Image (tube, helix red, strand yellow):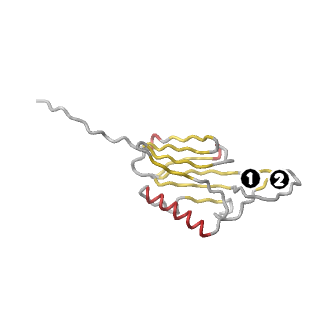
Amino acid sequence: MKCNNHNSRPMPMSLQDWASEVEQVMDRVFGRTVPGGAGTASSGSGTTAGAFMPAMDVSESETEFLVHLDLPGVKLEDVTVEIHDDRLTVHGKRHGVCQSEGAQVHRVERMVGEFTRRVALPKTVDQDKVQARFEHGVLHIHLPKLVKNQPRKIEVHG
């Protein structure tokens, strides 16, 4: 059994630059710039060209921020989610597909390797209540907002 760990062709540089700029804009929207950019990937060789980089959506409701990462082919045990210094970090690895001995490969388009995605968190996230679930190849991270003190009337005693 031979494992095929080939990476597909790298994105044209102009698309990589655009993707990096979008990530940086997302960080600015959340109020902080993350050193080294919002997402990095490596294929084990220290290079980012052609490495697996999962798609990520970030949205906000009145009560929480939501982060969704597409992780098809990634095993739950190969994913870690951490919060440190107001930064959400998701790290993981997608392994290559094993081919039968003597099989002739005609096309390889699915990228493999390690990835790291980072999102700067606003101060309004209640870090003690963050929850994550992995379902149907998608990682869902719920980042609840801190509950603000609601205005209330104070009774004055005489």
* Residue found farthest to the top: 158
Labelled disc at residue 65: none
The tag earlier along the polypeptide, 1 or 2, is 2
Q: Residues within 10 Å of mark 1 (few under 14, many from 20)?
A: some
Q: Residues within 10 Å of mark 2 (few under 14, many from 20)?
A: few
In percent of the image, x 64 and y 60: which residue is there? 42
User: As shown in the figure, which amino acid type bears the numbered disc 2?
Assistant: Lys
On the image, the x and y values in percent for residue 27 come to 47, 58
Query: Which of the 4 image quadrants contains residue 105?
Result: bottom right
147 and 88: which one is in front? 147
In percent of the image, x 65 and y 65: which residue is there? 11
On the image, the x and y values in percent for residue 62 come to 40, 44
The residue under label 2 is 2
Q: How far separated are the C-alphas under marks 1 and 2? A: 10 Å
User: As shown in the figure, which amino acid type bears the numbered disc 1?
Assistant: Gly
Q: Are marks 1 and 2 in contact (CB under 8 Å)?
A: no
Vertical placement of residue 45 versus 158, above or below = below
Secondary structure of the residue carrying tag 2 is strand
Vertical placement of residue 54 versus 11, above or below = above
Left or right: 130 as drawn, with respect to 153: right
Secondary structure of the residue carrying tag 1 is loop
In percent of the image, x 62 and y 59: which residue is there? 41
Left or right: 117 as drawn, with respect to 108: left
Vertical placement of residue 33 versus 148, above or below = below
The residue under label 1 is 96
On the image, the x and y values in percent for residue 12 come to 64, 68
How many numbered callouts?
Answer: 2
Quadrant of the frame with the C terminus: top left
Left or right: 158 as drawn, with respect to 88: left
In percent of the image, x 41 and y 57: which residue is there? 31
* Residue found farthest to the right: 102
